[in-house]
Image: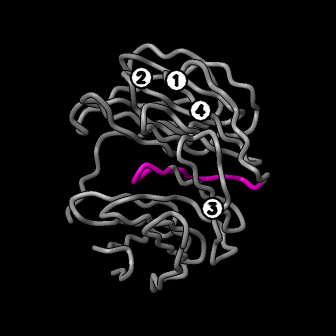
Amino acid sequence: EDFYLQGVSCCGALRALAFGDGVWFTGGSDGVIFTSTDTANWFVQFLDTDETMHGAAFGNGNYVFVGGRGEVFRSTNAGAWAFERTDTRETLYDVVFADGRFVAVGAAGTILTSVDGNAWAPEDAGTTEDLFGVGWGDDVFVAVGKRGVILTSGDGSTWEAADSPTDQTLNEVAHGIGTFVVVGDNGTVLTSADAVTFTERDSDTRKELLGVTFGDDLFVAVGRDAEILDSTDGVEWF
């Protein structure tokens, strides 16, 4: 319930945030990133790019940022960062590590996979809609994006479209207590217990919801104008 402003005060918007092996790492505009081991003291670094970093994830001992023009940066120590080449120049908006691999999603239906954050393979999404969020739970990857698109995959490589009850842009997806929760524009909230059937829920807001996560038995969604909502089941929001 209590949040405290920490001493990070430069360099524009921060859009990506993840944690791994004792290190928090966040990045955003112009390739500027910060790392911290305690969330009180942050160390600023500058990637060799002027592109925005939109997504971050940690896995297999690798810290990974994804961003504009298909750029990926990887580090094994959160200190020295290497640019990793991909086969796309589309913006990458999100990345998740699960089931032994990274899955990144982006503009024009772009999906990339990698086991080490170094070599990335393009996958067929079956859509050209922009994909803004990707998550994992119950052995299923779920990607969401523009015009209500929802894609699912058991391995990150073969993707199928799920029936979506909305044409609103969907921005992020999280999983907890056996439930997927998807949030999007105009206060959109969807839930699914099986990544097949998605049901629209009343969030009691019409503000754009940009992020959602699960922790401590609670879903928390955030959005425009500092909107913060929480739910114990993904159905009722407060």
Residue type for callout 2:
Asn
* Above or below, comparing residue 172 to residue 208 in the picture: above
Badge 3 amino acid: Ile
Residue visible at 52% across and 62% down in the picture = 210
Does residue 50 appear left or right of residue 77 in this picture? right
* Whole-number angstrom distance, CA of label 4 to CA of label 3: 18 Å
Dot 1 crowding, Cα within 10 Å, few <14, some 14–19, many 20+: many
Q: Are marks 1 and 2 in contact (CB under 8 Å)?
A: yes
Q: Which residues are magenta?
A: 129-140
Residue 99 percent location from the top left of the image: 42, 37
Q: Residues within 10 Å of mark 2 (few under 14, many from 20)?
A: many
Task: Tell me which secondary structure the magenta stretch mostly adopts.
Answer: strand
For marks 4 and 3, the one nearer the N-term is: 4
Q: Nearer the viewer, mark 4 or mark 2?
A: 4
- As measured in the structure, the alpha-carbon distance from the residue carrying label 4 to the one carrying label 2 is 14 Å
Of marks 3 and 1, the one in the foreground = 3
Q: Which residue is mark 1?
A: 117
CB within 8 Å, label 4 to label 2: no
Reply above or below: 141 against 82: below
Between disc 1 and disc 4, the foreground one is 4
Query: In the figure, residue 82 lies in which quadrant?
Result: top right
Q: CA distance from mark 1 to mark 4?
A: 8 Å
- According to the picture, the residue beneath numbered tag 4 turns out to be 113
Image quarter hosting the N terminus: bottom left
Which secondary structure lies at badge 4? Answer: strand
| Label disc, if present, on residue 132 of the rendered structure | none
Residue 109 location (% of width, % of height): 73, 48
Label 2: state its secondary structure: strand
Q: Secondary structure at mark 3?
A: strand
**Residue under pointer 2:** 62
Q: CA distance from mark 3 to mark 1?
A: 24 Å
